[in-house]
Image (cartoon, grey):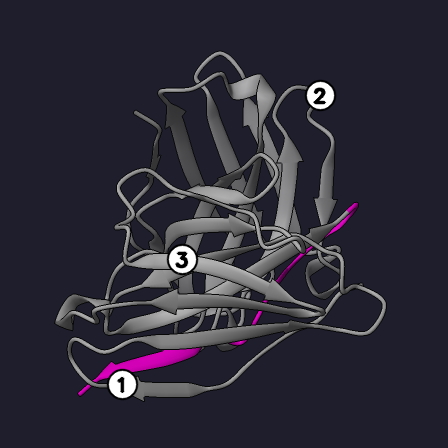
Amino acid sequence: QVQLVQSGTEVKKPGASVKVSCKASGYTFTSYYVHWVRQPPGQGLEWMAMINFNSGVTTYAQNFQGRVTMTRDTSTSTVYMDLTSLRSEDTAVYYCARSGPAVDSWGQGTLVTVSS
Amino acid sequence: QPVLTQSSSASASLGSSVKLICTLSSGHSSYIIAWHQQRPGKAPRYLMKLEGSGSYNKGSGVPDRFSGSSSGADRSLTISNLQSEDEADYYCETWDTNTRVFGGGTKLTVL
């Protein structure tokens, strides 16, 4: 079955960077996109970025341009999200998700807390 | 890019039915959407993909009580025979070439 398994909780100081991973299994990776979606405490879902797993081409939401980088490692079927210049407003649960074309599978989420 | 509008909250009694609506912005009324359920403290779960024709495809394991329908720019999720475990936030999602959009979510309370 499709599984997206994310890395664990992170606590970072303002100005630092965080890298979250998402390991995929149970499907043909090159046929789907993978996305990062975040959810601040008590708020809704916000799309951040996506990667074509086959080509490696990325697209970023305007709100995160210049601060987020999404990469993939085809040998381990893992996708990464790098977010720089962290601020308190970046405190959220970060989800990876698969789409083809609708999002149809979600990772379990990674809590990133930004606090001094 | 498309915008999705959802009511912030809804409520219905145990065993009854409820219809949640997601409205596409002007110029995007033909778009396909997806519905997701998020129970408290859990990751979202894909429920179904819903086309403008009203045709829908549910995810694996989604109960028959969940159905979809469309009318113009409105995409609806109907839950019949409401159960306590249906109390959750429900999000709609759509996409364009270089973007993906989520509605603000509807918090469903089962009375």
Amino acid at dot 1: Ala
Tell me the residue that label 1 is attached to. Answer: B12
Query: For this rendering, which residue is in front, B95 or B49?
Result: B49
Q: Position of residue B7 (x, y in %)?
A: 51, 85
Question: Eyeballing the image, is B48 above or below B76?
Answer: above
The residue sitting at 36% across, 44% down in the picture is A107
User: Residue A85, how many percent across, how many down?
Assistant: 60, 62
Residue occupying the far right of the picture: B27
Q: CA distance from mark 1 to mark 2?
A: 46 Å
Residue B68 among magenta residues? no
Q: Is residue A4 above or below residue B16?
A: above
Give the camera-side residue of B67 and A85. Answer: B67
Q: Amino acid at mark 3?
A: Ser
Q: At 58% across and 28% down in the image, what residue appears?
A: A32
In which image quadrant can residue A22 be found?
top left
Subunit of label 3? B
Q: Which residues are magenta?
A: B97-111
Q: What is the C-alpha distance between the residues marked 3 and 1?
A: 16 Å
Q: Nearer the viewer, residue A62 or B57?
A: B57
Helix, strand or loop status at disc 2: loop
